[in-house]
Amino acid sequence: MTHLESLALRFTHTPHKTELWILDQTVLPLKEDWILLDTVHQTIAAIKALKVRGAPLIGVVAALSLGQSAVKGSTLKQLQDEAHALYSARPTAVNLMLCMNRMIAGIQSKKTPEALLGTAIDIYNEDVQLCEDIANNGTALIQDGDNILTHCNTGGLATAGIGTALGVIRKSRQQGKTIHVYVDETRPLLQGARLTTWELKKLDIPYTLVTDNMAGHLMQLNKVQKIIVGCDRIAANGDFANKIGTYALAVLAQYHTIPFYVAGPYTTMDWHCADGNQIPIEQRNASEVSGVKGVFGQILWAAPDSPVYNPAFDVTPAELVTRWILNCGVFTRVDFDQGSVRQRIPCHI
Ligand code: MRU
């Protein structure tokens, strides 16, 4: 029997049943609803709707869903089609593509269903370890007394483990450092306000929620010592895509000479993207900006049929990043320019 359990995912595999459950992140923190994903079709819908989200976790869930499909008897042709459909469920986070490529390689080499599921379980376990390594590498950058600003959600809800940026915060706190977190609400889908506050509260880490447009004011008042964010795709030159609003924080950080750190696993590196201009940016539905869809239904606050621009991510240029905290070390821009990051991370997609 295999049982995997993280903050947002539960997976059980026995000779009699294979079940994949996710915590519905669209209704947190008001409701803690677990959803059973029986088919790849359901998994794709859940990924698109952000019921499951975060660059590492969508890759892990997609792999487990495909593994489940294999042990439930799908043919190699069906698995191949399902893998391709999962691959394009969301376009920006490269982790999903990496995980699908690993699974597709297994399908093409005609691995047994159990072996394919084994690859997915390896992907889950690796992600747990990658989070630990990122956190261990990042804590050296956090000082006792720091007020740390973060954006979006990068914790246990976004990974199989303790998270990336939030993992660094969590580990620093475990080491006994007194820290306080400013949580950006993260418009339009409020991953900061809904998810990061929920996690920090559970972890008993002191935090204050602010709206995104308060970040500059906080920096001007010297209330922020560090900024740490996650990432969805890092280009070969160190430019990276992350939740919309990250770029504005990086510009503000430079003006106020505040260290700006980005944390992520090697599975977020894309050596095929020479720079950030080549990273595809997901465009989402207008209704996310013109109103809100919550547990009480859809509320519209903009004038009906207002034109809307809703990119889910933006790109932060490498020149605004103080350090990249990866699972294999902490890097500077010089490390990217001189190729030492590339030496540590092979080309994988
Ligand atoms: O649209 P989301 O909620 O999936 O966006 C998530 C982010 O932008 C995170 O910062 C990123 O995936 C890193 S999560 C460890």
Image (tube, rainbow, N blue to C red):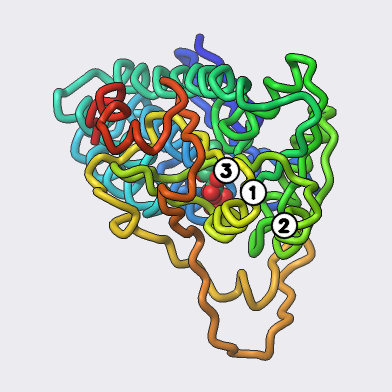
Q: Residue at x 41, y 20 (%)?
A: 328
38 with respect to 80 (left or right)? right
Q: Residue at x 29, y 34 (%)?
A: 74
Going from the N terminus, do you reach mark 3 or mark 2 first? 2
| For the residues bearing labels 1 and 2, Cβ distance under 8 angstroms | no
Q: Is residue 65 above or below residue 13?
A: below
Disc 3 element: strand
Disc 1 element: loop
List the residue tagged with mark 1.
151
Disc 2 element: helix
Front in this rendered view, residue 107 or 168? 168
Going from the N terminus, do you reach mark 1 or mark 2 first? 1
Query: Residue 81 location in percent, x, y?
Result: 24, 45
Q: From mark 1 to mark 2, how far is it between C-alphas?
A: 10 Å
List the residue tagged with mark 3.
260
Q: From mark 3 to mark 2, how far is it between C-alphas?
A: 13 Å
List the residue tagged with mark 2.
215
| For the residues bearing labels 3 and 2, Cβ distance under 8 angstroms | no
Dot 1 amino acid type? His
131 with respect to 149 (left or right)? left
Query: Residue 144 location in percent, x, y?
Result: 77, 24
Q: Is residue 37 visible?
A: no
Quick check: is the Cβ at mark 1 less than 8 Å away from ligand 1? yes
Please identify the residue farthest to the left as the structure is shown. 109
Dot 3 amino acid type? Phe
Q: Residue at x 57, y 61 (%)?
A: 248
Query: Residue 52 location in percent, x, y?
Result: 56, 44
The label nearer to you, 1 versus 2, is 2
Quarter where residue 213 is shown? bottom right
Q: Is residue 203 above or below residue 316?
A: above
